[in-house]
């Protein structure tokens, strides 16, 4: 598992509106059995994203928005298959987390 990897959401109750989970945890903490993730909502399910707080990405022909305010710790075993990496969007993802915690 690596920081900024995207995984399928395996939860049958939420996977339609939240098809993916974004791993935000630093690789240094890879030995932990949990991962800190942000849900990636479909635009239809989330509504209008907030500038800086909810960066958008295109994954498998679906536009999703990172719900930064809904970070969660989950067991590694609940993560589905790895879909892709958003490492090239590191700056936008970190900026969203900074905005959540510092307001700028």
Image: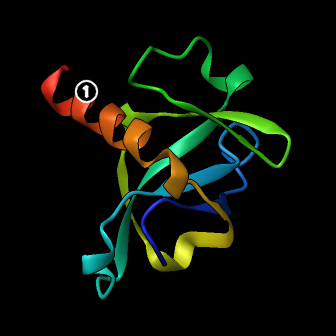
Picture coordinates of residue 99, whole percent (x, y):
25, 27
> From what the image shows, is residue 19 above or below residue 79?
above
Quadrant housing residue 24: bottom left
Q: Is residue 12 left or right of residue 34?
A: right
Q: Residue at x 53, y 52 (%)?
A: 88
Picture coordinates of residue 71, whole percent (x, y):
36, 45
Picture coordinates of residue 38, whole percent (x, y):
45, 47
Check disc 1: other Cα within 10 Å, few if <14, some if 14-19, many if 20+: some
Q: Is residue 35 left or right of residue 47?
A: left
Q: How is the image coloured?
A: rainbow
28 or 22: nearer the eye? 28
Q: Is residue 21 left or right of residue 43?
A: left
Picture coordinates of residue 90, whole percent (x, y):
42, 48
The residue singled out by tag 1 in the image is 99
Dot 1: element: helix
Q: Is residue 98 left or right of residue 12?
A: left
Q: Residue at x 33, y 82 (%)?
A: 30
Check the picture and name the quadrant holding the C terminus: top left
């Amino acid at each position: 598992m690596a920081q900024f990897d995207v995984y399928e959401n395996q939860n049958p109750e939420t996977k339609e509106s939240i098809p993916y989970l974004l791993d935000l945890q630093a690789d240094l903490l890879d030995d932990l059995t949990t991962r800190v993730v942000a849900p990636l909502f479909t635009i239809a399910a989330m509504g209008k994203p907030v500038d800086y707080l909810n960066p958008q990405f295109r994954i498998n022909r679906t536009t999703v928005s990172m719900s930064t305010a809904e970070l969660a710790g989950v067991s590694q075993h609940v993560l589905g298959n790895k879909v892709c990496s958003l490492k090239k969007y590191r700056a936008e993802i970190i900026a969203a987390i900074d905005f959540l915690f510092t307001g700028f």
